[in-house]
Amino acid sequence: MIDLCAIRRLQTTLRIFEEELKTKTGLSFNDALLLCAVNKGIFEPRALARELELSPSRLTRVLDSLEARDLIARSLSDSDRRSLTVTLTDRGSAMVREYSCSEIILPEELHFTQIGREESII
């Protein structure tokens, strides 16, 4: 049996974590995930949308927001002029470095090595 109360606690914990992330960094969860994805080498919008499970329109809004804050830059792809490439700006790279070692602590409920050990969902 799935423990719906545990899932609700997880959902609440994640929401609180997202609020703390926004307060400390100014980034939404999707903003932060996109910066991390670009930092690990995913540069094409289509691949970013797949990685982050975002619709093209939602991805565009996230990219617009990050570009307006000078955290990413979009440019024409070297290999295909019809495509764009997303890169971190110096400011975006600095933010990724800074918050990779930040004091934002991942709540214990979000340590996925602990979730589901007591009971199998299947």
Image (cartoon, rainbow, N blue to C red):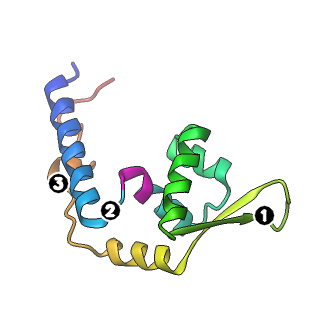
Q: Secondary structure at mark 3?
A: loop
Q: Which residues are magenta?
A: 28-32
State the separation of the CA atoms marked 2 and 3.
19 Å
Q: Amino acid at mark 1?
A: Ser
State the separation of the CA atoms marked 1 and 2.
29 Å
User: Is there a contact, CB below 8 Å, between mark 1 and mark 2?
Assistant: no
Mark on residue 51? none
Viewer-proximal residue among 111 and 52: 52
Q: Amino acid at mark 2?
A: Gly
Q: Which residue is mark 2?
A: 26
Q: Nearer the viewer, mark 1 or mark 3?
A: 1
Q: Residue 43 at x, y = what percent?
A: 64, 62
Q: Nearer the viewer, mark 2 or mark 3?
A: 2
**Residue 96 higher or lower than 32, as above or below:** below
Mark on residue 77? 1
Q: Which residue is mark 3?
A: 107
> Going 30% across and 76% down the picture, which residue do you hit?
101
> How crowded is the residue under tag 2: few (<14 C-alpha within 10 Å), some, or many (20+)?
few
**Residue 66 higher or lower than 117, as above or below:** below
> Going 17% across and 47% down the picture, which residue do you hit?
109
**Of callouts 1 and 3, which one flags the residue occurring earlier in the amino acid sequence?**
1
**Of callouts 2 and 3, which one flags the residue occurring earlier in the amino acid sequence?**
2
> Going 84% across and 54% down the picture, which residue do you hit?
82
Which quadrant: the C terminus?
top left
- Seen as rendered, the residue at the extreme front is 68
**Residue 19 falls left or right of residue 46:** left
Q: Quadrant of residue 100?
A: bottom left
Viewer-proximal residue among 11 and 91: 91
- Seen as rendered, the residue at the extreme top is 1
**Residue 58 falls left or right of residue 104:** right
Viewer-proximal residue among 122 and 24: 24
